């Protein structure tokens, strides 16, 4: 009923979440604004703003994000300041430096990673973050265990 025999349509339907489809912000690149992607993204440069990825976010050792991140899964080796919401697994590598509030279903932290902020774990799937800006004047919320 919903299947197509046209090879072009089949490849179009499967291309958005394939691991071969990778957006990349290389070291030395600075972006300010909003990034939305239906696939994976790797940040080795600097981003100031909002990143929304339906796939995996990788922040390399030279990567920095100042703002809000919403993604399916994430591997962090670099720095994040702001907020991060992950539907699946958030993995903080030994070189990760986070000063942000975390909302995730699962969290893995390697020895050496530094995290300062609040963490909310478990529960259901994160739909979206309503407040996309980071308000430094707001009071911090208490960390909850799910």
Image (cartoon, grey):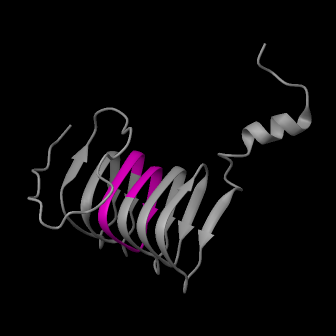
Residue at figure coordinates x 65%, y 45% from the top left = 17
In this rendered view, identify the residue nearer to me: 131 or 98: 131
Q: Does the stretch in magenta take in 74?
A: yes
| Residue numbers of the magenta segment | 69-89
Question: What is the x, y in percent for residue 6?
Answer: 91, 31
Residue at figure coordinates x 54%, y 86% from the top left = 28
Rendered position, 4 above or below 122? above
Question: What is the x, y in percent for residue 32?
Answer: 46, 73
Question: What is the x, y in percent for residue 22?
Answer: 65, 60
Quarter occupied by residue 100:
bottom left
Give the position of the N terminus as an image quadrant: top right
In this rendered view, identify the residue nearer to me: 83 or 90: 83
Question: What is the x, y in percent for residue 108?
Answer: 35, 55
Rendered position, 31 above or below 115? below
Give the position of the C terminus as an image quadrant: top left
Rendered position, 74 above or below 146? below
Q: Does the stretch in magenta take in 98?
A: no
Residue at figure coordinates x 63%, y 63% from the top left = 23
Quarter occupied by residue 26:
bottom right
């Amino acid at each position: 009923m919903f299947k197509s025999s046209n090879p072009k349509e089949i490849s179009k339907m499967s291309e958005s979440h394939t691991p071969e489809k990778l957006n990349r912000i290389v070291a030395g690149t600075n972006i300010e604004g909003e990034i939305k992607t239906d696939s994976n993204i790797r940040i080795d440069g600097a981003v100031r703003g909002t990143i929304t990825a339906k796939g995996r976010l990788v922040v390399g050792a030279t990567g920095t994000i100042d703002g809000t991140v919403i993604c399916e899964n994430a591997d962090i080796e670099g720095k994040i300041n702001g907020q991060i919401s992950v539907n699946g697994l958030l993995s903080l590598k030994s070189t990760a430096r986070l000063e942000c509030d975390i909302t995730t279903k699962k969290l893995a932290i390697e020895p050496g990673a530094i995290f300062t902020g609040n963490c909310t774990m478990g529960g259901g799937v994160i739909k979206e973050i309503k407040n996309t800006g980071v308000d430094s004047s707001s009071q911090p919320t208490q960390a909850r265990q799910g």
